[in-house]
Image (cartoon, rainbow, N blue to C red):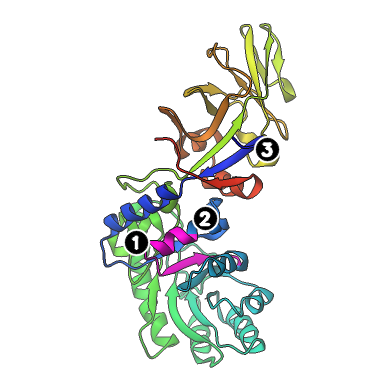
Amino acid sequence: MSSSPAWVEVDTAAVADNLAAVRVGLGPDTPICAVVKADAYGHGADLIVPVLAAHGVACIGVTSNDEARTARAAGFFGRILRLRAALRDEVEDAADLDIEEWVAGAAHAGVVAAAGAATGRRPRVHVSINATGISRDGIDLDLPDAAEQLTAIGGDRRLTVVGVASHFPCEDADDVRAGARAFDAQSRLAGALLSSGPLERHCATSYAALTVPASRFDLVRIGAALYGDTSASVPGLRPAMRLVSRIAAISTYPAGRTVGYDRTHRLDRTARLAAVPLGYADGYQRALGGRAEVLVRGRRMPVVDRLAMNTLLVDVSDAADAAIGDEVVLYGRQGAGHIDAADLERASGQIAANLYTSWGRLMPRRALPLPV
């Protein structure tokens, strides 16, 4: 039992099993870039990278230098691809990490090239294009200066262009198919201006790669599916995280009393309310207040208040056996019950990753098998 009032448990065996399930879904010949950005989606790059390396993953995707440094310290000697545009000081700081940089246009390419020159290296780069219409950081080939930008990047001898990339904006099969067709055509045009040789082409993330085979190209970037959270249909995936706390106190209040801040909940009967020492400061966002459910003794119980900074209230009136010290599971399994990503999304109105990516970075985290 943890001495912390709340903690995150990470099932590394689930990550290994999810990787195997993804490989079955993709087929054995599809190269994978396993994404460990946001500290492995809150699961901990220090816990996840050794699992990936042990199971033959040769490329990982990061956003921060800390993630790349953690991977190298864990003995990962494969490729590391940054999945966003980096600042100059980040590129310079990463000189010893051998990161392949994501380039967002000619001006940004100049920044990356200058950073590389300042540290005595020639960065390998992947040029982002806006073929899918995400309009975030790629060159839009419909603009009149697109060819000029691509030619300038390809002609910069301070850089080695190794890839052309994009990113899908929607988890919708028809949208992905259309985006994949556009990327196929535009990446060929871009590639001809960037290099005289073949370039690696990639745009598919978990949903796209596992739903639309035409989106796979030369490499697929698999993130959410590794952690058991994707809307793609993949048999055998399971969440690799539990968010856990305990009941600190139980108090009884009569019908008619209001509960928590702003009096948003009024009791319609005498109720037993359990105080759980976890709140919005811990990443359990206020949007979940009065909407989410948690598990106590394997049964679903409602969160009834609007949440405090470090406490939430659960109505355990229907669990006469609930007691101080009982485990409370806010995400994951407990006995036969489970709170999954879909539950979080219904309660919060947000994607689940917007919640759980922060939990492991805000609370103590440990690796152990989860209950089955």
The amino acid type found where label 2 is placed reads: Leu
SS class, disc 1? helix
Is residue 87 at least partly visible in the picture? Answer: yes
Q: In the image shown, does 121 or 126 lie closer to the viewer?
A: 121
Q: Is residue 150 above or below residue 263?
A: below
Task: Please state which amino acid type lies under the numbered disc 3.
Answer: Tyr
Magenta stretch: give its range: 49-64
Membership of 57 in magenta stretch:
yes
Residue 124 percent coordinates (x, y): 50, 82
The disc label shown at residue 178, or none: 1
Label 3 residue SS: helix
* Mark positioned earlier in the residue sequence (2 or 1): 2
In the image: residue 155, left or right of residue 111: left
Disc 2 is placed on an element classified as helix
Residue pictured at 61% horizontal, 25% vertical: 290
Residue at 39% across, 46% down: 231
Mark 3 nearby-residue class (10 Å; few <14, some 14–19, many ≥20): some
Identify the residue at horizontal 43%, vertical 54% (top origin): 170
